Image (cartoon, rainbow, N blue to C red):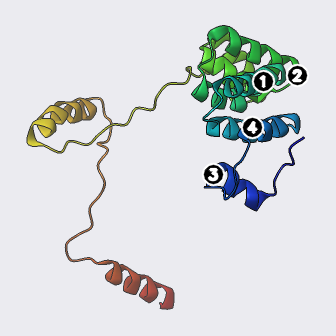
């Protein structure tokens, strides 16, 4: 059996350029047997000359994570080898059966199961019964500010609609030209003394 290296040696072996040849398959299997799946996956990613060994190690880590219902390990495995919905569902069932409610919620969001999302959020106290369930995970949307005159012209009707609806415009208040941060600090000191 391969000996698991200490933290400093591990950093050099797994992430750096080791000084001696390393049997990444044997090391990955040792990490897997020791219950360290992320380290095992790191070793599997370094296996270059044995695709069958790489596949066997990734499969072993995946199967163990499916049995445990470990969302984070399965998410890492998914980066190496894409999982199908049946595998995500198996992970969800294992997480739910073993009482890993937060993992089960992550699986439900990944699967897009709104009924389970709602039930698990209620169970975890993440929302009240009156609130709608969270949407399945999606890429975050970032709203860009208008940078060109054409984009500013497009944004103007939205500002008018906000004003008609009685909403305040979402603009930052700019400092007055005669005020500087130093003036503010001096004014605060005068208030504190007075």
What residue is shown with label 4? 40
Residue named by callout 3:
15
Q: Residue at x 84, y 39 (%)?
A: 30
Residue beneath label 1, please?
A: 60
Q: Can I make out residue 76 in this image? A: yes
Q: Earlier in the sequence, mark 2 or mark 4?
A: 4
Q: Which structural element holds mark 1?
A: helix
CA distance for labels 2 and 4: 23 Å
Q: Residue at x 67, y 40 (%)?
A: 42
Tell me the residue at 49%/91% (across/down): 193
| Image marks 2 and 1: residues in contact by CB distance under 8 Å | no
The reply to whether discs 2 and 4 touch (Cβ–Cβ < 8 Å) is: no
> Which labelled disc corresponds to residue 98?
2
Query: Percent position (x, y) of residue 67?
Result: 83, 20
Residue 180 percent location from the top left of the image? 29, 78
**Cα gap from disc 1 to disc 3, whole angstroms:** 22 Å
> Could you tell me how far apart the alpha carbons at marks 2 and 1 are, in whole angstroms?
20 Å
**Marks 2/3: CA–CA distance:** 33 Å
Q: 109 or 131: nearer the eye? A: 109
- Can you tell which quarter of the image residue 76 is in? top right
State which mark lies toward you, 2 or 3. Answer: 3
Q: Give yes or no for contact between labels 1 and 4 (Cβ–Cβ under 8 Å).
A: yes
- Could you tell me how far apart the alpha carbons at marks 1 and 4 are, in whole angstroms? 10 Å
Q: Can residue 127 be seen by looking at this rendering? A: no
Q: State the image coordinates of residue 93 (x, y, percent, origin top left).
A: 79, 13
Q: Residues within 10 Å of mark 3 (few under 14, many from 20)?
A: few
Mark 4 or mark 1, which is nearer the start of the sequence?
Answer: 4
Disc nearer the start of the sequence (4/3): 3
């Amino acid at each position: 059996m391969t000996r698991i290296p200490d933290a400093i040696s591990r950093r050099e072996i797994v992430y750096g350029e080791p000084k001696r040849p390393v049997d990444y398959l044997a090391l990955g299997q040792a990490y897997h047997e020791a219950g360290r799946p992320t380290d095992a996956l790191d070793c599997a990613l370094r296996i270059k000359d044995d695709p069958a060994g790489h596949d066997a190690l990734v499969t072993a880590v995946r199967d163990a994570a499916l049995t445990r219902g470990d969302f984070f390990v399965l998410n890492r495995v998914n980066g190496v080898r894409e999982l199908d919905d049946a595998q995500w569902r198996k992970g969800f069932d294992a997480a739910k059966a073993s009482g890993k409610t937060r993992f089960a919620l992550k699986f439900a969001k990944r699967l897009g199961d709104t009924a389970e999302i709602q039930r698990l959020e209620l169970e975890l106290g993440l929302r009240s019964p009156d609130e709608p369930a969270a949407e399945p995970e999606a890429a975050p949307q970032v709203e860009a500010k208008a940078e060109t005159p054409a984009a500013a012209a497009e944004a103007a009707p939205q500002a008018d609609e906000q004003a008609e609806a009685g909403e305040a415009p979402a603009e930052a208040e700019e400092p007055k030209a005669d005020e500087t941060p130093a003036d503010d600090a001096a004014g605060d000191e005068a208030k504190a003394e007075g």
